[in-house]
Amino acid sequence: MRTLPQLLTGLLCIGMLLDPGAVSAQEAKPIDELTKLAEDVFLFRHKAHQGLVVVTADGVIATDPISVEAATWLKAELKKLTAKPVRYVIYSHDHADHIAGGTVFADTAVFVSHWRARQDLLEKKPVETPLPELTFTDRLFIDLGGKHVEAIHVGRNHSDNSVVVLLPRERVLFAVDFIPVEAVAYRRMRDSYPEEWIESLKRVEQLDFDVLAPGHGPVGRKEHVRMFREYLEDLMREVRQAVLNGMSLEEAKQTIRLPKYEQWNGYPDWFLENIEAMYQYLSVH
Ligand SMILES: [Zn+2]
């Protein structure tokens, strides 16, 4: 367990993962850690990936297991907090780097996802994790041991099956890969639906919470949802104008700059790839 100053230091370190100058800070970090976000609510980090854990009187509700190595560490760590087992594992979306390793909890847990994640897991390259056995379309409520958790599909964005996990009483929201905190989108925005992504962010802005717990990087606040929505809108507007002006992709990459976001993580490396992804999307939509 870490105190608030340690927590802040840790969050800064996560934010610095993308900064090559921060190698020494990165090396100082443990591979795995559990950070308290609210009473009985923890952010679970394994290297650069994160999940959410809710401890209740009747068992644990966890999200993405990340990998066998990560989930094995988490299972042992949870034994220090509770004698109860993991009862539910909620998959944020179907991408293997977040949901592999669920087998570690298969002896006690029910696996939950959006129905399309189950379809994608059946149809795409198999992921070494149990298939979801409980799926939903819009919103699923889980009440366990005095805790209330909501899994909500807010539309297509970074995938066609992303769900957010909302803890209305603790005012915490967990979201993976589609709401980076003061960071541009990851590389070429693979598997994404840019216009629907913006709409899904507006739906998240309608939810009631304070703390934004992401699948990567520093913990944020609700305002970070609006900030990232504005980034996508600004990017789309600029790239659309370039396409309308008949610019080639290379010209667009040389011309378009969004100085408002220069300080964000990933801007030096991934902004040009974000332009490329948006250019290709808008060229066919
Ligand atoms: Zn993903």
Image (spheres, helix red, strand yellow):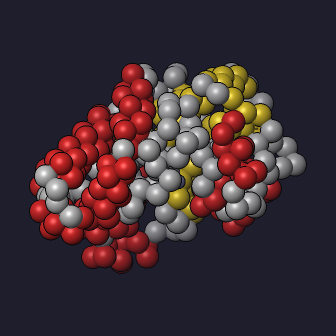
Q: Along the horizontal axis of the image, is 212 left or right of 40? A: left
For residue 87, side relative to residue 224 (left or right): right
Give the residue drawn at x 31%, y 61%: 276
Kindly tell me whether residue 5 is visible in this rendering.
no
Quarter of the image that includes the C terminus: top left
Give coordinates of residue 140: x percent, y percent. 65, 25
Name the residue nearer the viewer: 49 or 39. Answer: 49
Q: Residue at x 41, y 56 (%)?
A: 189
Image point 72% across, 33% down: which residue? Answer: 135
> Which quadrant of the structure image shows residue 203?
top left
Residue 236, by quadrant, is top left
Q: What percent of the width, then of the height, locates residue 65?
A: 67, 53
In the image, is residue 133 above or below residue 103? above
Name the residue at 13% across, 52% down: 245
Tell which of 59 and 125 is nearer to you: 125
137 vs 271, left or right, is right
